[in-house]
Image: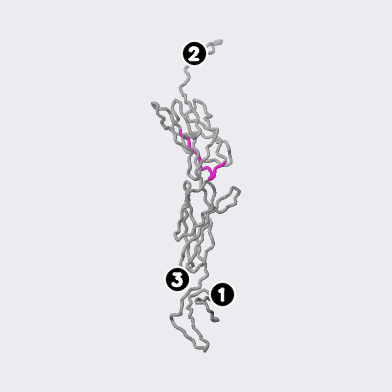
Amino acid sequence: IPYKSEEVVSYTYEGMLSDGEYISEIKVIDNMENTLSSQENETKFVIYTRKPVIAEVTVYSMDQTAEVSWAANLPQDHPTQVAISGYDLQLYRDNGSECFEPVPGSQVSTEMSQYKYEGLQDGKYMVSVNAKDTVGNKGDPVQKGFTVDTVVQNASEFECISGEREEKPLFQWRQVEEDLSGVRGYKIEIYRDNDGKPEKVVDEKVEHVEGTQIVKYRLKLQEGLPNGEYTAYLFTIDNAGNETKLEESPKTQIKINLIPIKISTLEINGYSGQP
């Protein structure tokens, strides 16, 4: 290495060393070919080019937060001097056309194996995670998609289509056509008046039916409803766990009247001796 007048001299080995542990010794040579070497001028270093690997990424989203956690591994034969030093994260959001764009301010570097994003708007997201080691290697990023969904859509056209003399009412409604996380199912709650206070008498879950707009569903009660007037509510439940509130759910009125008809007068007329 030619002499340079700088106080600090740098030199790079390019493409000459394979993975392994090395000792670098610096010798000083003067113009008279005298050589000075010392153990104080020895430096130990490691060449290691194999990348760390993100084994798994999981996301738990609730309300407007997303908790991201992951596991990372080094190759089994890595030198003891090499360890994982940290992680880089980047969050992307679907712009509505299945095209994910970086979320401003979401690029994060951390030494922890988990991170929480807060204040997220409803939408579809993808988080990218990659690992770094102590010798500067960066692993390939691993992506995980998730959805932030805080609003559930209401079903519509909810009505009771059975008569007063059917103790197990038959309902009909139009299913939710679009929901960000998808519809898991429905729930029917039926209330009756009990001394001025609503009393819940039915709480029955209904599975979502794919491929149909109009659903007809008869209650699967062990015993039918007794005579009286009722109010039925239909709740929608989506895959994010959101459920419509009582005051926002569609409702319909039910009347059950199973009192038999009384015959007040019966006349029998005979014709030619036959009744």
Q: Residues within 10 Å of mark 2 (few under 14, many from 20)?
A: few
- Name above or below for residue 241 compared with residue 89: above
Choose the circle earlier in sequence order: 2 or 3: 3
Q: Nearer the viewer, residue 121 or 266?
A: 121
Q: Nearer the viewer, residue 220 or 83?
A: 83
Quadrant housing the N terminus? bottom right
- Under tag 3, what secondary structure? loop
Residue 64, label in figure: none
Choose the circle earlier in sequence order: 2 or 1: 1
Q: CA distance from mark 1 to mark 3?
A: 21 Å
Q: Nearer the viewer, residue 164 or 91?
A: 91
Say left or right for 271 vs 118. right
- Under tag 1, what secondary structure? loop
* Place of residue 176 in the rendered image (x, y in percent of width and height, measured from the top left): 55, 39
For the point 46% across and 77% down, the residue is: 43
Instruction: Return the residue found at the far right.
Output: 97
- Name above or below for residue 256 compared with residue 38: above
Res 178 seen here: yes
Residue 14, label in figure: 1
Residue 81, label in figure: 3
- Name above or below for residue 169 compared with residue 130: above
Choose the circle earlier in sequence order: 1 or 3: 1
* Place of residue 32 in the rendered image (x, y in percent of width and height, measured from the top left): 52, 89
Mark 2–mark 3 CB contact (< 8 Å): no
Q: Residues within 10 Å of mark 3 (few under 14, many from 20)?
A: few
Q: Is 180 included in the stretch rendered in magenta?
A: yes
Q: CA distance from mark 2 to mark 3?
A: 105 Å
Which kind of residue does numbered mark 2 sit on? Leu
Q: Which residue is mark 2?
A: 266
Which kind of residue does numbered mark 3 sit on? Gln
Instruction: Return the residue found at the far bottom.
Output: 32
The residue stretch that appears in magenta: 178-189
